[in-house]
Image (cartoon, rainbow, N blue to C red):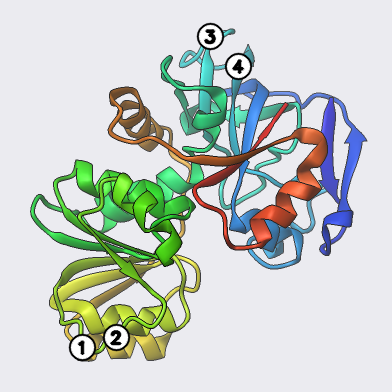
Amino acid sequence: MKAIILKEAGSVENLEYVELARPAINEGEVLIKVKAISINPVDTKSRSGKGVYGRIKTENPLILGWDISGIVEETKSSDFKIGDEVFGMVNFPGHGKAYAEFVAVPANQLALKPKNISFEDAAASTLVALTAYQALVHNANIQEGQKVLVHAASGGVGHIAVQIAKHLGAKVTGTSSAKNKDFVLGLGADSHIDYHGFDWKSAGRTFDFVLDTIGGDNIDHSLEVTKEGGSIISIPTGLNEEVTSKANSKGVKGYFILVQSSGEDMKQIASFLESGAVKPHVSKVFPFEQMREAHLEQETGRTVGKIVITL
């Protein structure tokens, strides 16, 4: 099979195309013939030596990637049969090995792909959708009528989070640059904040929950607008002790979450996709042979929605 390995951390030139044997599957696993892959900031960070690289750097061969959709080729699980169309996030935050024509996946990390969506849209609805779902449902327990702020609402996690929060009955505000305002409102957001030059200190503490997908100073901005008793989840940087202390001083609860592979959660996401409650936005599609170009595009930090690779 075709695969892309990473011999050592570094630039996109370190992504090397090779031929490997198809992976063998163990009990409880299925072999997926991959139709589409999506990439995320963690892909490019891990390639450069950050992200989850430290967890998987001793793997040989080291194959990046976690988000896939495809067709069951072999199965050692009663959950799926040969020919089933499936999607999921593989072994995150471990070694996903998704940059390949065939991927061995624990069956309990997959869900059936809804028939009304493409393989490209399915691949785009994995890590980002799981992150948004696990943050909003498992951690924040968002309730109808609550006020939710989603930072970077035009990005991968953000654009899905806006839609899930709205589906849960929340009143949602999304941040982005002015040029993406219409996109964010089109997702269903009730209001929009242009983060350029916004006066966070004077905005008032109105939000029950803030999902921060940016980190850095954004955590401090978020604390300025979160109600006492409210909560913040920060995804990229976590909450260090200083910020946790700041949150506590304002009566705000701070979390850091790391998304986990989950077939049960993928089934919920599949139901959202099937009903139309959630629609992923794929901004660019690259062929497998252009994974390096896809990484460079991801690294611009200006992606609206998701980048997908097809095989």
Position of residue 158 in the picture relative to residue 32 (left or right): left
Amino acid type, label 3: Lys
Q: Check disc 2 and report the residue beneath it.
A: 199
Q: Quadrant of the N terminus?
A: top right
Q: Mark 2 near mark 1, Cβ–Cβ under 8 Å?
A: yes
SS of the residue under disc 1: loop
SS at circle 3: loop
Is 252 in front, or is 223? 223
Which residue type carries mark 4?
Answer: Ile
Residue 132 seen in the figure: no
Disc nearer the start of the sequence (1/4): 4
Front residue of 58 and 280: 280
Q: Which of marks 3 and 1 is nearer the N terminus?
A: 3
Residue 202 circle label: 1
* Residue drawn 72% across the image and 52% down it: 295
- What is the CA distance from the residue labelled 1 to the residue labelled 4? 52 Å
Any part of residue 226 in sight: yes
Q: Nearer the viewer, mark 3 or mark 4?
A: 4
Classify mark 2: helix, strand or loop.
loop
Mark 2 and mark 3: Cα distance apart in space? 55 Å
Residue in the foreground of this view, choosing between 52 and 115: 115
Describe residue 28's horizontal placement relative to residue 210 as left or right: right
Q: How far apart are marks 2 and 1 (CA)?
A: 6 Å
The amino acid at mark 1 is Ser
Residue beneath disc 4: 71
